[in-house]
Image: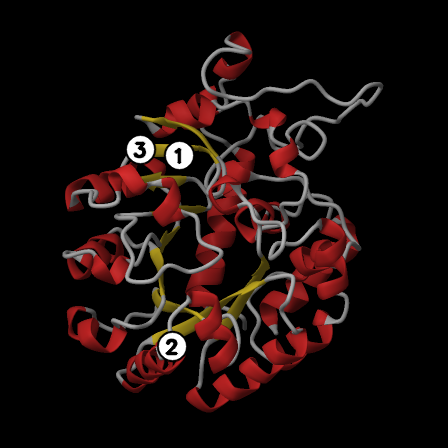
Amino acid sequence: MKFHLAMTAGLAGYILKNKMRPRPEWQKNAAAETAGAGPFRVLPPRTGEKRQPHPMIGKRFPIVLMLEPLHACNLTCTGCGRIREYESTIAERVPLEECLAAVDECGAPVVSICGGEPLMYPRIGALTAGILERNRYIYLCTNGMYVARRLGEFRPDRRFYFNVHLDGMEKTHDLCVEREGVFRAAIEGLRAAKTAGFQVCTNTTVYKETDMREIEELFEYLRQFGVDGHQIAPAYGYAAVDDREIFLTREDVHEKFRDFGRIASKYPVRQTPLYLDFLKGERDLPCTAWGNPTYNVQGWKAPCYLITDGHYKTFEGLMTETPWESYVPGNDPRCEHCMMHCGFEPSAALGINAGLAGNLKMLAWTLH
């Protein structure tokens, strides 16, 4: 199975429960009552175009919480906007108690601890322990450089993964993160974690110059360490780092991932087959940004992990006051080329536009 039985059953039960009985306080449409107010860029649809409402707009609930306890990082990666976007608050930290309160308020079964570099957070061990006490699943997203140094603050748990970022083999990866030696340090951290009994995944961003043959080479190289899974997504040129020379259009993404199914069949790729079909241009998925809400030093980030038009003090405010239907290709130009998994994997998990064949494909992938 792609995930162990308890995790698979738990996530399936959570999704089914919320689809059947969504929490009513999250379904209010306060944004419609205040259209045009606030910081949101609500644009009219293209002339003559009729857009169908999102099929889950009245049944909103979170699946993965993107928790950013800090934005500070020891690297200045070319494609990362956090250290630039949050320059004024780069030294701030979300207190431990506030992080755990966000986990409780949101209730998502999976927490992705990201940043910044979360292993620079002073109480990262206590944070992960507190999240596990709440019976949540954790993906700790790290560049890997501090894994070996701070490994003693964690305990192996089937609900906990180190998620190490690798964008290619050594030369390519070090170029992407703008520092030599990072690939080797990340591999050493990955190796130390696996030796100590931890589950380890990798996360890879695909840029315009990425050679997909090198991604296959990377996955083959990582096989020797017993890596538990791989995540992959196309780079998206959001405002803080909008340099079109390195980022991909939708057409670029379709071309890059055209043959990726062959690679995914050989290695433990954790992206769903419906999302991969979307990347290849063979399936349409709507953005379900509320499925992966983000919490950071300024609060609940709206509308999504990549675009910042405002922050809310409460999760209910995020869910009900954000004009979700405005953030789609054709309405907001910033969404035009976005195909990031944080917006579209929730749609795949919810079975949107799947049909019978798609649902059977998802089932076979889950059980494989």
Q: Is residue 102 left or right of residue 360?
A: left
Please name the residue that numbered disc 1 is placed on.
301
Q: Give the number of the disc on residue 168.
A: none
Provide residue 153's location: percent of width, then percent of height. 16, 69
Please name the residue that numbered disc 2 is placed on.
180
Q: Is residue 186 left or right of residue 236?
A: left
Mark 1: which amino acid? Lys
State which tag comes first along the sequence, 3 or 2: 2
Q: How would you rate the neighbour count of disc 2 (Cα within 10 Å): few for under 14, some for 14-19, many for 20 or more?
A: some
**Where 188 falls versus 9 (above or below)?**
below
State which tag comes first along the sequence, 1 or 2: 2
Front residue of 220/16: it is: 220
Q: Residue at position x 73%, y 21% from top?
A: 45
Q: How would you rate the neighbour count of disc 3 (Cα within 10 Å): few for under 14, some for 14-19, many for 20 or more?
A: some
Provide residue 16's location: percent of width, then percent of height. 54, 44
Front residue of 366/101: it is: 101
Residue 66 appears in the figure:
no
**Where 201 falls versus 218 (above or below)?**
above
**Where 86 falls versus 266 (above or below)?**
above
Mark 3: which amino acid? Gly
Please name the residue that numbered disc 3 is placed on.
299
Q: Check whether the beta carbons of the residues at disc 3 and disc 2 lie within 8 A of each other.
A: no
How did the renderer colour the structure? Answer: secondary structure
Q: Check whether the beta carbons of the residues at disc 3 and disc 1 lie within 8 A of each other.
A: yes
Residue at the extreme top of the image, as rendered: 33
